[in-house]
Each structure stands twice: as structure tokens, then as C-alpha cells.
Image (cartoon, helix red, strand yellow):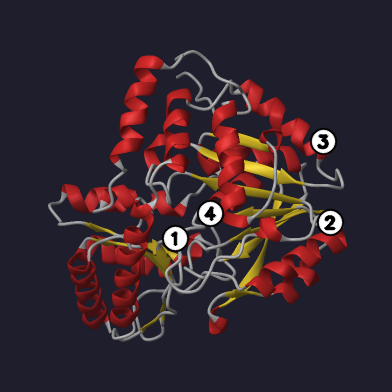
């Protein structure tokens, strides 16, 4: 018998919870179960549609734009459009040389962590937080250090804990605002405290702002507005606000007047050259999405607010569940009281719910084992009637087992 080639420890250690639940969901669907998939933050799976002028630009780009390889840093005209967007939105001035275009924010996270981390290095991330950060930190043999988001205070970040968890191996501090998975929108004073910490300890601040215009309660405050002495990388993209999730275009830009990250920029650019370039025709459409009418965003926020209000009300009517209200992004992160139930973990709860009722959430421990346990994430994207059906089935499921 021939020997089996083993996969690397790094690859076998990957465990992306948001997609992990698709495996039991596929089994339930093949058994004939009607599925209500509230696990993926993909607006286009529901009644949100990519604006036609984006799609028309892509068609024209395929026909008329050079379809050869593009600039490894990103097409110049898109980077210039991003510079204008950031000035119009946040009042900040950057140059096209500060901007790097990626195949979605996920590629940017991968490249960043591959540049920042040597084995044993630490990165502070929100807990609960978006799993890709944890996955790539671990992949490059770093250590994920979560800091608490305080549920009792509408998921505000515990900046005191951040200070206590900084060590001489800390390489970066990550924040996600508006937040995935909690739906929190951080107050300006909390963002300023992130900046104070980053400047005090010379730790780069990585601010993931991909939901920056999806805010339906309060106002968004960007980390780009922090003082010049705060070393920052701001991440953003076109999947959520611009309704282009499958097009895979994102970007980051550096704000680092002190030159703390000069070598990081070089290391990231080496990787961008190795992957050649981001999708060239889709970059043309991404540029158009920044320069054309933006009225669809107001309509998206109106629908999301209605669905967030319904989700908040309905979840808190169900025995054993309790949830804070989402202020932005696409998600809510309710707590489940597992006492007196047959489920030992939130993952068992989620997987059994999929099997018995066809309702697909994501287990909270997949977003942080320390601070995500006994929770699950649901999306706010589905129409109210679909959300109502899903929550009715969830309530029936809980009552049947308690």
C-alpha cells in the first residue's frame, strides 16, 4: 500500500466556523429538510441586489479594458478613487501609494498576518471576533490573544483588558467596527482609546471597517481620524456596503507617519507581487461603485434596521435567549442559557437545531472560545417573514428540549 501524503499542521488546524456549519446543513438538506440559512453575511443571497451600473461597468471592462495582468498594488485609477472616498467619508488625506488592493479583505488579513508574525508572536483581537483573524494568526504559528467585548455594555471593547494583555511579543492590535459578530458600533471615545494604546506601546492598530456605511443606529467613527502618531492599517472592501461579495475586491491603506511599519509595507508588497494582481475587470467595477449613485445604501440600511428591530424583539421573546440590539453590520449575537438543556455547548445546540429544524446559525464559540461560548450568530439579511419562520422554529426546538 502506498503511503499517504500528510497535510501540514497549519492547514489541518484551520477551522472556519461560519462555513463549518454548511456541512451538517448540507446533510439536512439532502434529507429533505427545508433550510433557513442565517449563517452567511452575504446580502445577495436575499433581496439585496448589486446595482446595475456596477454590473454594466464590469461587462464593458471585460470587452474594452486590457484583460492582461494588472498592477500588483492595484490599478491606479481605483486607488485614486479610494483616496477620494476616504477623504469624502472621513476627511482624511492619503495618497494612492498608501493603498493596496486585494482579493477581498480576507486576502489582506492573510498577507498581513504572514508579514507581521514570526512563530510565538501575539496579536490582540476582539472576542468574540471575525474568525479569519484567528485562523491566519494560528496558521502562521502566532498566538491569538482575545480581548473582551463587554456584553452588558452593548459589546463595547474592554480597553483595560487590552492594556493588561499586551506583552513584549504583541505585534498588532485588531479592531472591527462596526463589529462582526455582535453588531456593535463603537463610540468615538473607545476608538480614541485604541489610538492611545497603539501610540503608547508602538503597536500597529489594524482597523477592519468593511461595514463602515452599514449603520442604522448612531454614527460610525473611523480609526483613520486618530492623531498622526497612531500607526494604523485600515481595511475595507466592496463585499458588504457595495453589494459585491463574490467579486472579491478589497483594500487596505497605511497611516504611519513615524515609519514604524516601513518594513511591513515592503513585506506585504513582496507577497502581492507573488500573487500577481487582484482581478482587473472587477477593479474597474469597484471604481464605478465608488463614483456612481449611492442611494441604494440608504435603502439597504432602512431594510436592515427593520429586520434588526424585529430580530431583537423576537429573540428576546424566546425562553433561554437574550440579545443586545445591533447598531450596525449584518449580525446579532444572542446568548443562550444552556442550563437545564441537553446541550453542553453552543455548538451542540446549533448543530442539533440544523438537524431537527433546518435553521442554520453559527455557534458563538467559533468566534472566540473564551468570550463567545453560550452564544450564536444570526444574520439580519433575510426578510422579516423568513426571520419570523426561523425564530418560530428555534422557539419550538428549545421548548421541545427543555
Q: Earlier in the sequence, mark 2 or mark 1?
A: 1
Frontmost of labels 3 and 4 is: 3
Contact between labelled residues 4 and 1, with CB atoms less than 8 Å apart: no
Q: Nearer the viewer, mark 4 or mark 2?
A: 2
Residue at the image point whose x is 24% and y is 78% from the top: 395
Of badges 1 and 3, the one in the foreground is 1
Q: CA distance from mark 2 to mark 1?
A: 28 Å
Work out whether residue 252 or residue 147 is closer to the camera in this orientation and state it: 252
Say which label, 1 or 4, has the lower sequence index.
4
Write down the residue under mark 4: 131
Q: 142 left or right of 64?
A: right
Going from N to C along the chain, the mark reached first, 4 or 2, is 4
Q: Where is residue 131 shown, x and y percent of the image?
A: 53, 54
Question: Residue 229 shows which numbered tag?
Answer: 2
Q: Mark 1, mark 4: which one is toward the viewer?
A: 1
325 w.r.t. 47: above or below: below
Looking at the rendered structure, the secondary structure element under dot 4 is helix
Is residue 40 visible to us here? no
Which SS class for mark 3?
A: helix
Question: Which residue is denoted by mark 1 in the rendering?
Answer: 214
The C terminus - image quarter: bottom left
| Residue under label 3 | 263
Asked whether disc 3 touches disc 4, contact meaning CB atoms under 8 Å apart, the reply is: no
Amino acid at each position: 500500500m502506498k503511503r499517504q501524503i500528510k497535510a501540514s499542521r497549519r492547514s489541518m488546524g484551520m477551522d472556519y466556523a461560519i462555513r463549518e456549519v454548511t456541512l451538517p446543513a448540507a446533510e439536512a438538506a439532502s434529507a429533505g429538510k427545508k433550510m433557513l440559512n442565517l449563517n452567511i453575511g452575504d446580502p445577495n443571497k436575499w433581496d439585496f441586489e448589486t446595482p446595475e451600473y456596477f454590473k454594466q461597468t464590469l461587462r464593458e471592462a471585460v470587452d474594452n479594458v486590457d484583460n492582461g495582468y494588472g498592477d500588483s498594488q492595484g490599478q491606479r485609477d481605483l486607488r485614486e478613487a479610494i483616496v477620494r472616498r476616504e477623504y469624502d467619508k472621513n476627511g482624511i488625506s492619503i495618497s494612492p501609494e498608501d493603498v493596496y488592493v486585494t482579493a477581498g479583505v480576507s486576502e489582506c488579513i492573510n498577507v498581513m498576518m504572514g508579514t507581521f508574525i514570526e512563530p510565538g508572536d501575539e496579536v490582540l483581537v476582539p472576542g468574540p471576533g471575525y474568525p479569519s483573524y484567528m485562523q491566519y494568526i494560528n496558521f502562521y504559528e502566532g498566538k491569538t490573544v482575545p480581548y473582551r467585548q463587554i456584553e452588558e455594555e452593548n459589546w463595547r471593547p474592554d480597553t483595560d483588558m487590552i492594556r493588561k494583555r499586551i506583552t513584549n511579543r504583541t505585534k498588532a492590535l485588531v479592531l472591527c467596527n462596526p463589529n462582526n459578530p455582535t453588531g456593535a458600533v463603537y463610540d468615538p471615545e473607545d476608538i480614541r482609546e485604541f489610538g492611545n494604546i497603539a501610540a503608547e506601546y508602538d503597536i500597529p492598530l489594524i482597523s477592519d471597517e468593511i461595514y463602515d456605511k452599514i449603520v442604522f443606529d448612531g454614527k460610525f467613527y473611523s480609526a483613520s481620524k486618530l492623531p498622526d502618531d497612531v500607526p494604523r492599517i485600515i481595511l475595507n472592501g466592496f463585499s458588504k456596503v457595495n453589494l459585491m461579495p463574490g467579486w472579491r475586491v478589497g483594500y487596505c491603506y497605511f497611516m504611519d507617519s513615524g515609519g514604524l511599519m516601513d518594513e511591513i509595507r515592503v513585506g506585504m508588497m513582496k507577497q502581492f507581487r507573488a500573487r500577481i494582481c487582484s482581478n482587473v475587470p472587477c477593479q474597474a467595477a469597484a471604481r464605478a461603485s465608488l463614483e456612481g449613485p449611492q442611494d441604494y445604501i440608504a435603502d439597504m440600511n432602512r431594510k436592515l434596521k427593520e429586520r434588526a428591530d424585529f430580530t431583537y424583539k423576537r429573540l428576546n421573546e424566546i425562553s433561554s435567549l437574550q440579545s443586545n440590539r445591533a447598531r450596525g453590520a449584518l449580525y446579532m449575537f444572542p446568548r443562550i442559557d444552556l442550563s437545564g438543556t441537553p446541550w453542553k455547548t453552543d455548538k451542540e445546540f446549533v448543530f442539533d437545531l440544523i438537524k431537527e429544524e433546518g435553521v442554520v446559525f453559527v455557534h458563538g464559540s467559533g468566534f472566540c472560545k473564551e468570550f463567545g461560548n453560550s452564544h450564536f450568530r444570526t444574520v439580519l439579511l433575510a426578510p422579516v417573514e423568513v426571520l419570523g419562520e426561523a425564530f418560530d422554529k428555534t422557539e419550538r426546538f428549545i421548548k421541545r428540549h427543555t
